[in-house]
Amino acid sequence: MPGIIETKRLTKIYRMGDIELAALRGVDLVIEPGEFVAVMGASGSGKSTLMNLLGCLDEPTSGEYRLDGLDVAALDRDEYADIRNQKIGFVFQGFNLLARTSALENVELPLLYDRARRIDDPLRAARDALERVGLGDRFDHEPNQLSGGEQQRVAIARALVNQPSIVLADEPTGNLDSRTSIEIMEIFQELNGRGITIILVTHEHDIAHYAGRIIEMRDGVIVGDAPVRDRRDAAIDVAALRRSGGEGKAARP
Amino acid sequence: MIGSFQFKNLMKTAFRSILKNRMRSFLTSLGIIIGVAAVIVMVGIGEGAQKQIQDELASLGTDVMMVFPGASRFGGVSRGAGSWSPFTLSEVEKIREKATALRALSPVVRAGGQVIGGGKNWSTSTYGVDPEYFVARNWDVALGEIFSTRDVINRKKVAILGKTVADELYPSGNPIGERIRIRNVPFVVIGVLKPKGQSSMGQDQDDIIIAPTNTVMYRLQGHPRIDFLIASARSSAEVDAAQEQLRNILREMRKLQDEDADNFNIRTQADLVETAAETARMLTLLLASIAGVSLVVGGIGIMNIMLVSVTERTREIGIRLSIGARSVDVLTQFVTEAVVLSLIGGAIGIALSFAAAFFVNRLSSLEMIINPGTVVLVCFVCVGVGVFFGWYPARKAASLNPVEALRYE
């Protein structure tokens, strides 16, 4: 099976004046469709840079990158934008929702830039996406009226609304308490179960063990790549937490 | 390609951003508000002045033509005194028959001389004319009546006094029925003209006595010579056509060959109107361009605040880019915002100028006319200002790097 993501000797060098900083120094990586990969590493290991390159937010300095069979290096700025719109959904640590904008409008946002017009009814698609992440009753809430976990769910709904084949999540649980984190992981596992490829950057081992494969990075190269043997099921963990905690909803931060 | 979903969102985003900083947006639009109001008021006052000039000239009779005998000097060649041929009464009759574009036509016979009446005397001009003269000049009597065509034929010795003459000879009474003597010829006063004031040349048009053509011709002058003709077209718009028709009739009547120059001159008030209107137009243009400067200043204000807005919203731009906005989408968004800001200013400015027009027309002697065309033009100018001054900040936003924009605090 060909990889949905294939990189060869991918490098990224940042230049600041005379100083060159090699953030990525030759990454060879193949990820197959439907995988759930966790990328781990200390800060400065290059995992966020790799994420930016895989998500077509930034261009590599050298090396090859094939996304779904497409040679990304040959594309221009607009085609990068279209790939981000059509094939990739982003989830960030800081949620990155638009302030003073309702959950529904936030989720609609990617559809504004959908030049292919694959989706006929943007409003319905946005509602469906919010319902999928369990926020069917929060359409009109603005980000400052939502808890951290709820904001991250809105962000996930926004990542899903354009029906991407890959979801890239950069420390999605970094700003959340452990219980909410597991609830978010439950959503990711559920999406992965439906065939969406998920790549998750995290530095928490607990979180990484909800993935199916862990890649470890250090100093801009991959130093470890192994399947997870004792993979955890977030649904079971959440159910266990509910029994011991007794409450249905995550506490607001 | 912008669909209604995209357009609605574009507008929503623009208004949300503008309303988020109400005070700032208002102060930014103030330049446009003042600029737009100033332009419309200036153009309105200019057009009011233009209309006043035209009305004034229309009261003098813009449709009036005067036909003088004599050689034309076109081409610098004068054929001299030999070609000088005054009009005759039979020519006047023929013109009346043929000139369908004319409303009225009258010969004018001028006679100078001393007038005695009411125990006083006064030096003035006496004009011998047909009753149509009053139609041509749009002039009527204030007292008494106008003589008839029969009076002209019968050479009846009746006179109509201009206001000035009436005031000089009969300062404290009604001159109707009084006997006066013009060059020792007795006349009966049958009317006093309405005052017409000074002509555009500064002449007192009321210093005049008017009597029937034939009376002046034969009783005063003693020879049948017409000094000039006065005529009026059916309307101001038909002056040119009437002038052309009159010229053709005269050339035909006088059997002029194609190569011959006219041996008469037709002058209209249209030239005068044109000059005056041109002056008013220049004035309007000058005022409008001075006011236009404040529109440019307003535009710079918009540019300034849009640059601030782009910096403030770097993170939002990053989010939009990360979910697949192309550069052109971001560009469109910020240009739209600048245009909306400019149009809001324009709308307030237009409302202000309407209020100004109300007060100017109510409280001052100036007349201010707001032309719908000006308002529409101003709206387009506002869009232009928004696009022009919004372009640079929008360009800046559109060229941001997504990763750096997302990282911006």
Image (tube, coloured by chain):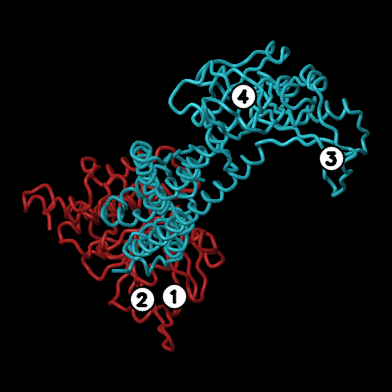
Chain colours: A red, B cyan
Q: In terms of secondary structure, where does tag 4 sit?
A: strand
Q: CA distance from mark 3 to mark 1?
A: 102 Å
Position in image of residue A161 (x %, y %): 37, 47
Q: Of the residues tagged 3 and 2, which is closer to the observer?
A: 3
Picture layout, residue B232 above or below residue A42: above
Chain bearing tag 4 is B
Within 10 Å of the Cα at label 2, are there few (<14), some (14-19), or many (20+) other Cα atoms? many
Respond whether the residues carrying marks 3 and 2 are from the same subunit.
no
Q: CA distance from mark 1 to mark 2?
A: 10 Å
Q: Of the residues tagged 1 and 2, which is closer to the observer?
A: 2
Please report the residue visible at 33 percent of the width from the left and 74 percent of the height from the top.
Answer: A216
Q: Which residue is mark 4?
A: B181
Q: Which residue is mark 3?
A: B71
Respond whether the residues carrying marks 3 and 1 are from the same subunit.
no
Q: How many marks?
A: 4
Amino acid type, label 4:
Arg
